[in-house]
Image: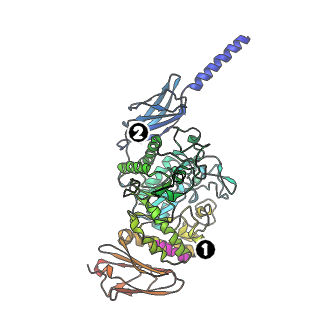
Amino acid sequence: MKRIIGTICVNLWLVISVAAQAPEITKVDPPSWWIGSSVNPVRLMIRGRNLQGARVQVSGLRVGIPKVNDRGTYIFVDVSIAQPGKHDISVTTPRGSARASFEVLAPLNRTGRFQGFSPADVMYLIMIDRFADGDPSNNQPLYDRKNKFYYHGGDLQGVIDHLPYLKDLGVTAIWLTPWYDNYDRLNEIELKEDKPTTGFHGYNPQDFYAVEEHFGTQAKLRELVETAHRSGIKIIQDEVMNHTGPYHPWVDDPPTPTWFNGTKANHLNNAFQTWSLHDPRPVELLQRETMKGWFLDFLPDLNQDDPEVSRYLIQNTLWWIGTTGLDGIRMDTWQYVPNSFWRRWTKALKREFPNFRVVGEVKDGDVVHTSFFQGGKVQFDGIDSGLDSLLDFPLFYPIRHAFAQGKPIDEIPKTLAKDYVYTNPDILVTLLGGHDDGRFMSEEGATIAGLKLANAFVLTTRGVPQLYYGDEIALEGGDEPTTRGDFPGGFPGDKRNAFTAGGRTKDQQDLFEFIRRLTTLHRELEPLKSGSLVNLYVSEQQYAYARYLRHNVAIIVFNNDNKEAEIEFGVSPLFILNGTLLHDRLGVARDVIVRDDKLRVSLPKRSVAIFAIHSTQRVL
Ligand SMILES: [Ca+2]
Ligand SMILES: [Ca+2]
Ligand SMILES: [Ca+2]
């Protein structure tokens, strides 16, 4: 009897052992691709167990020779894209086989998709979790509206529901914070105020090929892009390629030995010495710590110099665009990723989607620093990164200083005077607020009047204007979590609904209408979209400039002072007929007449005027 039990035990052990060694597939990246792509074959990364020695077949498709990592947890294999439909992936080893599926899609029609963005757009940044809860069924877990570091319920359906509101405000492009799947449990690694946090902001990707379940599904994302496009609104995806979330499965099981810069146990801490990134004679260690160090010592830094990482990230970007039809990308933490990678990435992107545009986040107030990262020319490092646009932080700070704090307005033209350093200043994305800074209205000295001026400036100067959700109703929030407050009316139980005129205070309504008038002028006056910029008058608290085209001109005049001002300035560069009567389209300044090629404009305290001039009023 003892011997029989012993034999059974041994046999059982063998069965378990054989079963344990049979291959398993847990994930396939990408899960699909489309016919006619510039990338063919596509490199699949198959995650699983016991994959050593695997052969890979995909029904109906040609595959290359698989490469398996030492631990048998990842296979890299090329598959040639053909024959739309679902295909079976089978992975076979001497110990068994496993299956998964892969889909070949028909390509999306290019009409009205992959549009890029331009200075004709009005961009609006939404933090998905904090804008509107359109589907309470996806709110759990980690849901607590009283905890500013938890999920608050905002989702893609909430954005879809408020497209008419955004259209009414004059928005033509929405930049959404990352919708990648983030960690599903409490983040005990990143503590805020000594407590665990969540990935409500989206910047800690857990799966680069999935939509965060709090926000919706891939199908819901498709629906959002389609619905937005029907409303004439583009969608900008927020991407992260520098790092993953601290709990990404790759951290404990990297697909290649060099997948990350270092390991969880042994890596550099990011030193944030960003100046060293464009230093022609850098201190090598400072540069390495900044480029390869882990953010806050715990965000795993992806190694884009590893060819498999590079390939994975490039395909990932193309996949989101190619399967949803979205229009642009805002790239997080641009400067911490090597230009050599960006060159490959932007080339692949433009090859597949020629009209597509990318704006990079380089959070720095210095023009020289920021301009180093814009593409369009080969920099001293021998590389043209190919990056179209940057968030214009060098202009953001002067905007805050002048219009929020009431400091001299001339810091703005002094900053714009450095524009020649950029390869293309006209495509920079200008902003007066964003999700990483305290809100405008929480700056010391901020007033609604100042916020109006800031909006008027952003919507009339060169660049692509970007608004931040809630700034149009003067939301407050002085630091990083509170700047990401809930839009009133977007959530169940909200006492008032500021998405409707009746739910706004008098001040909010006044501000909202002012911004809507500005976006209307931006849409109607061609020079505000594509005109050249020329400065006409600068003093400590007054600033006048024109945007001009061959036929049309717009003149914008600011008085940032706390008292009335009258200024006179020459307009001869604009060839306006003397005697022409100009009317302020914002209805603040009195009508003015051009005399001796000059304009004399009186403005109440802290106000702005916009004069539009047509071709019949010019000497052409
Ligand atoms: Ca929800
Ligand atoms: Ca998740
Ligand atoms: Ca990095």
Q: Name the residue under label 2.
A: 42
Determine which residue is flagged by label 1. Answer: 444
Query: Horizontal and vertical percent for residue 382?
Result: 38, 53
Question: What's the residue at 40%, 65% (across, down)?
Answer: 421
* Quarter of the picture holding the C terminus: bottom left
Q: Where is residue 78 in the image (x, y as percent from the top left)?
A: 41, 35
Q: Is residue 379 left or right of residue 336?
A: left
Q: What stretch is highlighted in magenta?
A: 447-457
- The picture places residue 489, in percent across and down from the top left corner, at 59, 63
587 displayed left or right of 127: left
The kind of secondary structure element at disc 1 is loop
Q: Residue at x 35, y 51 (%)?
A: 110
User: Can see residue 25?
Assistant: no
Asked whether 585 or 11 is in front, the reply is 11
In depth, the one of 3 and 172 nearer the eye is 3
Q: What residue type is labelled 1?
A: Glu
Residues at badges 1 and 2 in contact (C-beta under 8 Å)?
no
Disc 1 crowd rating (10 Å Cα; few below 14, some 14-19, many 20+) is few
Please tell me whether mark 2 sits on a helix, a strand or a loop.
Answer: strand
Q: Does residue 382 appear in the picture of this structure?
A: yes
